[in-house]
Amino acid sequence: MPPPHPGIRESRSCASTITLTMISMTEDNGGEAHPYCPPKVRRAAGSLCDPARGGSHAELFRLWNPRPFGLTKEGIFFLVPIHSRFLYLVSLIIFATMMTHSIEDRNWAGFLRRPIQQRDNDLTRTMHAGRSVLITGAAGSIGSVLAHAIAQSSPRRLILMDQSRHRLDSRIREIQADSPAVPLIPIVGDICHAAALDHLFATHQPDVVYHAAAFKHVPQLEIDPFAAIRNNALGTYELAQAAIRHGCKTFVMISTDKAVNPHSIMGATKRIAEMILLKGTSSRICMRALRLGNVLASRGSVVPIFRRQILQGGPVTVTHPEVSRYFLTLDEAATLVLAAASRTGDGSILVPRLGSAHKIVDLAHYMIAGHVDIPVVFTGLRPGEKMSEEMLSSCEMADPNVDRELYRVRSRTLPPDDLDDSIAALVQSSRQNDSAAALGIVRHMVPEFYPSDTLMALLHSDHTSAVRA
């Protein structure tokens, strides 16, 4: 028997002929199979387990209940005779085959109650062929799908930037296997570092930038607001300024419906990022922000959480019975981002045509369907969360001259004239960790921002500590 891969754990039972083998589905290894498996099996297991590739294992438990084999929140245990490497590989093949029956592939359209938007591959090739393309957050869920799609469009070079070396290496290997002729340039870096960005743009001269890097976990950022301020707002500013300085032609940022009338620091900082692009767009560079809703099966969505809870036999936890969100699939999200880049016209904020919002409890019941005795438990809204999200504020309207997929947002308000001064003040307060000053600047820039009680309590605590010091 070959030595175990770090992603596979083994333990001997009382019977010497049996070993307990687990294929881990944690994000640490993306469900990677044993290195001694045939390459096709290894690639199948890895990509099918990977949320960034749309993998899921919800349907596995509809078809085959493996509880007698043992379950943990980390993965699935298989009982395999220790002397039989053949049966060990068979277990991986069975697992990978069942993974193909995922809810993602089965019918998200059944939940969304609308057609799934399809990508125009010809338009994608026209947009990227022979061009240098940069993707930030390239190892994330949407960034990964973008990278695969663009790699198949014959770009001059594809620059993939992310903070996670491990995930980036994994994406590079996948893309090289699918598109071996495309020059790939991995960059492990931070969009907040202006000097590093200048070096990147001067060296690789990207014509098109897809800005997918962002901190998006709302409750966590409520207790660490500077992470959102530095990455989502200040990082976007540095990236946009580098693109302007170095002659980039097209810049598309993935924004969020949480930027509309924000109740979280995440939403407020993404709204600032939108204003940065609106201020920076010109006849030389087209800058656009695309507001998306909740992306089903992405790494940060509720879907993997529900899958894990269903895998464990429940309960499935939902914050409130009336909470609703706009949903779209992972492939749809990438399709819309690519459409935003290829759209004619000047810089703007764009919103997709997603139909009606859906209650999260309905999503939970949709995923539970077919599983018996799995209850839904309501836990209450978390810090920074709202009952519902909006695609447009009261000061905005959707342009009636729309294309098939996207609306252009027209607003009665413009980015403030003192935007650059406010950004400089935000940089200063961030360096000093002055949370009260930073929040004041954010509220000045985004007057409609209504901070959560958790954030206000954090600011009060920081002020009290400063006074005592």
Image (cartoon, grey):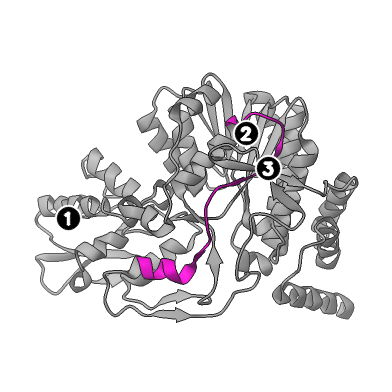
Q: Looking at the image, which residue is at 39% across and 37% down?
A: 174
Which region shows up in magenta?
A: 342-366
Q: Which mark is residue 244?
A: none
| Residue closest to the eye, 334 or 210 | 334
Q: Position of residue 268 (x, y in %)?
A: 73, 58
Report if residue 362 lies within the magenta region: yes
Q: Is residue 315 left or right of residue 232?
A: left
N-terminal of the pair, mark 2 or mark 3, is 2
Residue ID for mark 2 = 209
- Assess whether residue 374 is covered by the magenta stretch: no
The mark nearer the N terminus, 2 or 1, is 1
Looking at the rendered structure, the kind of residue marked 2 is Val
Query: Callout 1: few (<14), some (14-19), or many (20+) C-alpha neighbours within 10 Å?
Result: some
Which residue lies at the image location 83% right of the left edge and 60% below the top edge?
A: 432
Q: Residue furthest toward the top? A: 130
First along the sequence among labels 1 and 3: 1
For label 1, the residue is 91
Q: Which residue in the protein does label 3 denote? A: 399
| Number of other residues with Cα within 10 Å of mark 2, as a class: few under 14, some 14 to 19, many 20 or more | many
Label 2 residue SS: strand
Q: Nearer the viewer, mark 2 or mark 1?
A: 2
